[in-house]
Image (cartoon, grey):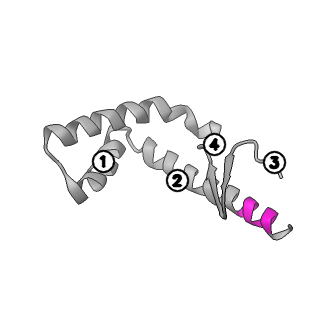
Amino acid sequence: MHFAAADILYVSQLWYAGVPIPEQHAAAGAQIEKAVQTALQETQEQQIIGSNITPYLLDRIQQLTSGASLTANIHLVKNNAKVGSQIAVAFSRQ
């Protein structure tokens, strides 16, 4: 079994797979990282805390990237499902 795009770590009975965003959709990475840092700074400045942080960050990052972060996240989730299913099939054949 070989997954070129994933790093897999076996610990006891658990498997952890680090699956990156597909390369063709990673171009927005620098833009998204800048937006993340900006949004995090804003949470501190505006004293956004607790359960309000995640919704604020997701919304603000989407605004700052003109939707590129949402598109990238959708591709990441789809790729995670694809790789996860490949891992499941490989395990089922053992």
In the rendered image, residue 51, in percent from the top left (x then y), is placed at 24, 59
Residue 57's disc number:
1
Q: Residue at x 30, y 47 (%)?
A: 57
The alpha-carbon separation of the residues under discs 2 and 4 comes to: 11 Å
Secondary structure beneath label 4: loop
Secondary structure beneath label 1: helix
In the rendered image, residue 40, in percent from the top left (x then y), is placed at 27, 39
Q: Residue at x 76, y 47 (%)?
A: 3
Q: Between 11 and 56, which is closer to the camera in this rendering?
A: 11
Sequence-first tag of 1 and 3: 3
The alpha-carbon separation of the residues under discs 3 and 2 comes to: 24 Å
Per the image, the residue denoted by label 2 is 74
Tell me the magenta residue range.
85-91
Sequence-first tag of 2 and 4: 4
Q: Residue at x 24, y 35 (%)?
A: 41
- In this picture, is 13 found above or below 11? below
Q: Is residue 38 magenta?
A: no
Residue 8's disc number:
none
The amino acid at mark 4 is: Pro
Residue 83, quarter of the rendered image? bottom right
Per the image, the residue denoted by label 4 is 22
Per the image, the residue denoted by label 3 is 2
Residue 14, quarter of the rendered image? bottom right
In the rendered image, residue 93, in percent from the top left (x then y), is placed at 86, 68
Sequence-first tag of 3 and 2: 3
The alpha-carbon separation of the residues under discs 1 and 3 comes to: 35 Å
| Dot 1 crowding, Cα within 10 Å, few <14, some 14–19, many 20+ | many
The alpha-carbon separation of the residues under discs 1 and 2 comes to: 16 Å
The alpha-carbon separation of the residues under discs 3 and 4 comes to: 17 Å
Q: Is residue 88 magenta?
A: yes
Answer left or right for 4 relative to 22.
right
